[in-house]
Amino acid sequence: MPYKISEGVKITVENAYQPEYSDPAQQEYLFAYKITIENNNSFPVQLLRRYWFIADSTGENREVEGEGVVGVQPVINPGKSYQYISTCNLQSELGKMKGMYLLENLHNKKTFEVIIPEFQLQVPYKLN
């Protein structure tokens, strides 16, 4: 599982191909990913924004940016974590994602960026 610790926050990523929601004949491949955000700081943080860079092996790259994650801007207390699951669609069997979150220290109201580690998206039969 890829993970990255920055600014006292650990981001861990798990992902899986979703064959039941994919249609290879139409070049539609769906991947689910689970993110765990663990606050190892002595202060609470709030996730304000997300940014994703998504690369598809077709050469089609895209960026996704917006408020919060899955419709919320969670507050994560010291020593606690927050998990969510989302999806990404590709036009090929291989791709990758990476990004960052903008968080706010709720004690001093300063914002800071936390890195989301790069992770691979690939259908299992491409591992051979």
Image (tube, rainbow, N blue to C red):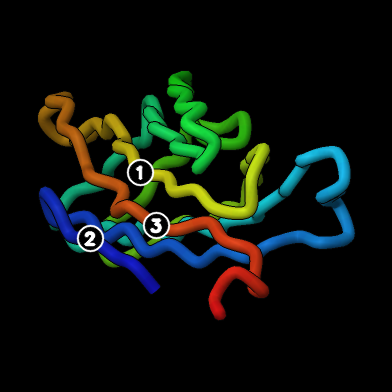
Q: Which mark is residue 4?
A: 2
Lateral position of residue 21 relative to residue 48, left or right: right
Mark closest to the chain's N terminus, 1 or 3: 1
Which three-letter amino acid code belongs to the residue tagged 3? Phe
Task: Point out the residue furthest to the top here.
Answer: 66
Check whether the beta carbons of the residues at disc 1 and disc 3 lie within 8 A of each other: yes
* Mark 1 crowdedness (10 Å alpha carbons): few <14, some 14-19, many ≥20: some
Total marks shown come to 3
Mark 3 element type: strand
Q: Residue at x 44, y 48 (%)?
A: 96
Q: Residue at x 50, y 66 (%)?
A: 14
* Mark 3 crowdedness (10 Å alpha carbons): few <14, some 14-19, many ≥20: some
Mark closest to the chain's N terminus, 3 or 2: 2
Q: Residue at x 53, y 56 (%)?
A: 121
The span from disc 3 to disc 2 (Cα, nearest Å) is 11 Å
Which three-letter amino acid code belongs to the residue tagged 1? Lys
Check whether the beta carbons of the residues at disc 3 and disc 2 lie within 8 A of each other: no
Lateral position of residue 55 relative to residue 22, left or right: left
Q: Residue at x 37, y 64 (%)?
A: 12
Q: Which mark is residue 22?
A: none
State the residue position of label 3. 119
State the residue position of label 1. 98
Which three-letter amino acid code belongs to the residue tagged 2? Lys
Screen quadrant of the C terminus: bottom right
Check whether the beta carbons of the residues at disc 1 and disc 2 lie within 8 A of each other: no
Lateral position of residue 48 relative to residue 24, left or right: left
Q: Residue 89's x, y, as percent?
A: 67, 40
